[in-house]
Image (cartoon, rainbow, N blue to C red):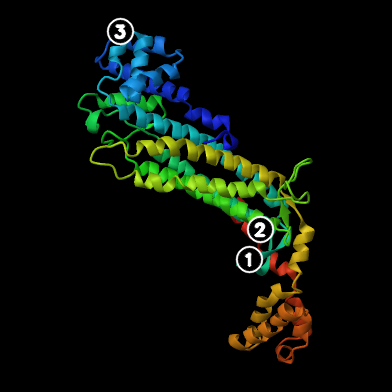
Amino acid sequence: MIPRYSRSTMTDIWSSESKFRIWFEIEAHACDALADIGVIPAQAAKTIWEKGGNAVFDVDRIDEIERETKHDVIAFLTHLAEIVGPDARFVHQGMTSSDVLDTCFNVQLVKATDILLEDMDNLLAAIKKRAFEHKDTVTIGRSHGIHAEPTTFGVKLAQAYAEFDRCRKRLVFAREEIATCAISGAVGTFANIDPRVEEHVAAKMGLEAEPVSTQVIPRDRHAMYFSTLGVIASSIERLATEIRHLMRTEVLEAEEYFAPGQKGSSAMPHKRNPILTENLTGLARIVRSAVTPALENVALWHERDISHSSVERMIGPDATVTLDFALVRLTGVIDKLLVYPHNMDKNLNRFRGLVHSQRVLLALTQAGASREDSYKMVQRNAMKVWEEEKDFLTELLDDNDVRELLSEEEIREKFDIGYHTKHVDTIFNRVFG
């Protein structure tokens, strides 16, 4: 993660200070539980909270100790002992490093997810607002990048809303999947620590006890979590790519807001480039890059190894921080998006009625022609529009084969734009309820 694509609300979760504070809380809550069941003195648990609860952990000092011990959790516990004093001998009773590391990692992911859910709520609100604003703004739908049939810009945005609403539901489930705690000791057997300690720590940290932790929390949970982030990133890219295409000079149906004083090119003063949505496309790739390593982390040796550790130290912060930034940026793009209905109308009519070809095709079949013959009649007139810049309606009216089956009134009726938007309300009711 780099400052350019980061927000402090998210990066703070992944700071060393935040990590060590969570480590302390895990250890201190475990001490409370150990005291409750009579394993350590109650006064020791109280002293640990009193001396460590308000302490400012010295990151540099912990790093210094780790350079000697080559072990981050031991380095932290050594520093904690410097703060707490003799009662620190009761800290980490029966626990193993993974109890602290895995539980902390999941706490951080839960905190990050809560921010991401708030981001998604803001994005959904922005999309919904613009969708209703352009519910009846007719535009051309495209398949393969080629004019297809009319739709509305509101329907385009309704699709995006439905997609991100699904993404939000997946993220809620991913949060639930990742919100587990492991305080089970070496190889996860609870041989040296009572399961009640895990239950207590889990409740205090807002987590659920992991049913079987084998010393580490199973990484299928994390694989699903990062896969969900990857799907959200892909949805961001989908909408960003749509906007990029609509910004093309030849299209120009919508455009990123271009602020006063903004510059688009160091060489060409006329440029207004899709820099934000291009940036979102790139950021989506970064988030998705976490998915494959997370999947590969599932297969660990026996009860545990640490091949996953180095991966997660990077993808945890990078994926959540980047996705947070991307969601906020996309919300801003949608909120300020410039929409040009005039250009939509101009593009819709650029090929002089071709977008109504299917209606004419269906009308001919209903009038008695075979589908094959109907297709040939419509296509030969459509090709004149493509190749000779003819008017589609005029060509159909002059086609004797077509006129034998359809009257002028019947042909003209097939060029009604309103026919294509008659079910917009149905779509909106399905999406927005």
Q: In this view, does 63 lie to the left or right of 344?
A: left
Residue 422 in view of the camera: no
Q: Distance between the residues labelled 2 and 3?
A: 66 Å
Q: Using the rendered image of the protein, determine whether residue 214 is visible from the camera's viewpoint.
A: yes
Report the front residue among 340 and 211.
Answer: 340
Question: Which of pointers 1 and 3 lies earlier in the amino acid sequence?
Answer: 3
Q: Name which residue type carries label 3.
A: Pro
**Residue 149: percent from left, percent from top:** 67, 69
In the image, residue 25 lies at what x, y percent? 40, 21
Q: In this view, does 421 lie above or below 287?
A: below
Percent x, y of residue 269:
78, 49
Residue 209: numbered disc:
none
- How far apart, in angstroms, are the residues tagged by discs 1 and 3? 71 Å
Q: Earlier in the sequence, mark 2 or mark 3?
A: 3
Residue occupying the point 45% across, 31% down = 108
Q: Residues within 10 Å of mark 2 (few under 14, many from 20)?
A: some
Q: Name the residue under label 1.
A: 145
Dots 1, 3 in contact, CB < 8 A: no
What kind of element bears circle 3?
helix
**Where does label 2 land, which residue?**
245
Q: Which residue is at the front of the view, 294 or 365?
A: 294
Whether residues under marks 1 and 2 lie with C-beta atoms below 8 angstroms apart, the answer is: yes
- Above or below, comparing residue 326 to residue 32 in the picture: below
Secondary element at tag 2: helix
User: Where 385 sits versus 100, above or below?
Assistant: below
Look at mark 3 in the image and give the residue it sits on: 86
Give the amino acid type for the residue marked by disc 2 in the picture: His
